[in-house]
Image (cartoon, grey):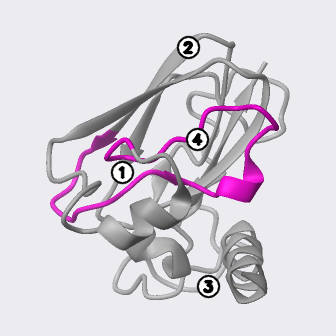
Amino acid sequence: MTDDISRRRFAVALASTGIGIGLAGCGGGGGSTDSPTDTATPTESGGGGDGFEQTNTVDMTDELTFEPKQIEVEAGTTVTWENVGSIGHSATAYEDEIPDGAEYFASGGFDSEQAAVDAYPDEGNVTEGGTYEHTFETTGEYEYYCIPHEMNGMVGTVRVV
């Protein structure tokens, strides 16, 4: 379990630096703010400047990203993840990174992170044009990832207020 936690923390830390492992062919030189992999796009931001957008829809893309990466919703809101590309993805909560007492979530409807990982890709794979929904009842922050693309930095956060 310690290796899993270290691997997760590494992936989250790597993703937060803007470094995309395995994302090739998009954009030009290093560090420009117009890079297609730039996750700090302010287009739908609901204010606050903390990187959280107020929306209940998250796109899963062929660029191996959740867009937006960080969202904020009110308790009782149903969030929809939609695969807008052609590559299969998952939306899988880090079991140890959700609020105490919160319902676990993972595409495929699993009750635990291990069950979701064990069943993927036969179950829980959101294919092209597919969606997954979860209603968030408990306030707090929920960190989640895409099973096959976690090491590419495909991670996200839902903040429930």
Q: What is the secondary structure assignment of the residue under circle 3?
A: loop
On residue 60, the disc is: 1
Residue 22 vertical placement versus 130 (above, below): below
Residue at the image point whose x is 37% and y is 56% from the top: 90
Residue at the image point whose x is 51% and y is 66% from the top: 114
Q: Nearer the viewer, mark 1 or mark 3?
A: 1
- Of mark 3 and mark 4, the one earlier in the sequence is 3
- Of mark 4 and mark 2, the one earlier in the sequence is 2
Q: Nearer the viewer, mark 4 or mark 1?
A: 4
Q: Is residue 101 magenta?
A: yes
Q: Give percent across and percent down for residue 65.
A: 46, 60
Q: Amino acid at mark 3?
A: Gly
Decide if residue 39 is on the left or right side of residue 119.
right
Q: What is the secondary structure assignment of the residue under circle 1?
A: strand
Q: Give percent across and percent down for residue 57.
A: 44, 28
Residue 36: in sight, yes or no?
no
Of 78 and 65, nearer the camera is 78
Q: Amino acid at mark 1?
A: Met
- Of mark 1 and mark 3, the one earlier in the sequence is 3
Highlighted range, magenta: 82-109
What is the CA distance from the residue labelled 2 to the residue labelled 3? 38 Å
Of 19 and 153, nearer the camera is 153
Q: What is the secondary structure assignment of the residue under circle 2?
A: strand
Residue labelled with disc 2: 77
Find out whether the residues at labels 2 and 3 contact each other: C-beta distance under 8 Å: no
